[in-house]
Image (spheres, rainbow, N blue to C red):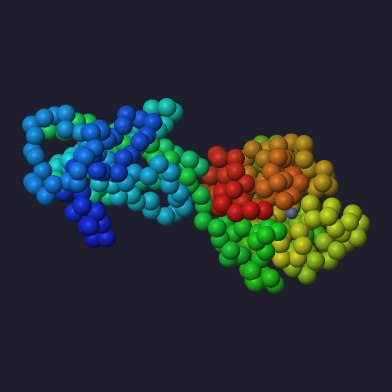
Amino acid sequence: MSRSRATGTSVLVATLLVAPLADLPSTPGTDPPPVATRAPAPTPAPAPTPAPTPADPSTPTAVVGWDPVRQGVVGETLVDKVVVVPAEGRVVHLQQQVDGAWVTRDTTTVDDDPVDLAEITLPEHWAAERTTVWRLHLPATATAASATSREQRVDARWPLRSDPADPTVLVNKSHPVEPARWRPDDLVVPRSAAARERVGLRPEAAAALDELAAAARKATGKRLVMVSGHRSAAYQGRLFDRYAEQHGRAAAERFSARPGESEHQTGWAADVTQAGTGFTGFGGTASSDWVAANAWRHGWVVRYTPGAEDVTGYRPEPWHLRYVGRDLAAWLHRTGLTLEEAVGATG
Ligand SMILES: [Zn+2]
């Protein structure tokens, strides 16, 4: 946490310097009210006079500019500017609510100005969960009372990526691959691929799938096999047409992507099964249970899960895995969110 004078807010600061406390924006909250209320002045504030320097420790403290709800994007720094009155030499604790208790994550000291801006940068903890709750706590000084800001809820989401070369890219029915015929040029066939599956995955995903298969084998004794990796837009088109012919178009759309709308086109998706089992019979096998619980450790997630059809647009597919990288996979595992929800998009 650091503090600075932000040039864009000098007018606000100047206003606050001459305003009586009662004219500050109120900051209601569930915690102890940060702004002790004084009877509103019935007439406009008098001409500026030097702020009184009371020896009264009950001088109320105001914290202004701490929004109750903020949205943050994982990977981006989240900075807040607050005005603290009176500010001279104040210590400001940034606290996070953890299991019902307040944990101090950072502490800063405001300069010796009567009114000052504190620039608060949230530490990494804000991005660890979908929602975190924060507050500011200012201990009392010789002249001013202690204060606690209202609570601030920070909602974290992951950036919505459209570059198909990015492992966190969102591809679904409303976010097709752009450009439509895009095709990775560095596909690698993982060791865990079935003998007839010679197309492959992006190198990072192929290595992670082999790691996943090795760990699965160690844990279950069963071999995990990739039966489908990259598919071109043209191939996906033929596949969808065949399903639509067999099951009708509406039914086909619930389990098959139209060309350009399949994650398989990116090289970041793999259909897997337990050796000796057709992939539609994968659900309920020892390998499937293990993969559902542990794939995230290797950067993979089961993309279409039970109860999420309204969000993803697909019926559950325990065999369809998606590589998103370890950080996002761990976050999705911890929050229980789909990729759509994590990036704030629709299916
Ligand atoms: Zn698939």
Residue 95 is left or right of residue 46, and the answer is right
Rendering quadrant holding ligand 1: bottom right
Residue 27 image position (x, y, % from top left): 33, 39
Q: Residue at x 22, y 57 (%)?
A: 10
Front in this rendered view, residue 2 or 280 = 2
**Hey, which residue is sitting farthest top in the picture?**
100
The quadrant in which residue 14 appears is bottom left
Residue 249 at what x, y percent from top left? Answer: 85, 58
Q: How many circles with numbers are drawn on the protein?
A: 0
Q: Between 322 and 4, which is closer to the camera in this rendering?
A: 4
Residue 104, given in percent of the width and then of the height, sits at 31, 35
Q: Position of residue 303 (x, y in %)?
A: 67, 48
Q: Is residue 213 visible?
A: no
290 and 190: which is toward the camera: 290
Q: Is residue 36 above or below residue 2?
A: above
171 left or right of 344?
Answer: right
Q: Write down the quadrant of residue 174 in the picture.
A: bottom right
The residue lying at 60 percent from left, 43 percent from top is 337
Q: Residue at x 64, y 69 (%)?
A: 178
Residue, far right: 246
Q: Is residue 21 above or below residue 102?
A: below
Which residue is depicted at the point 70% across and 46% down? 310
Question: Looking at the image, can residue 16 be seen?
Answer: yes
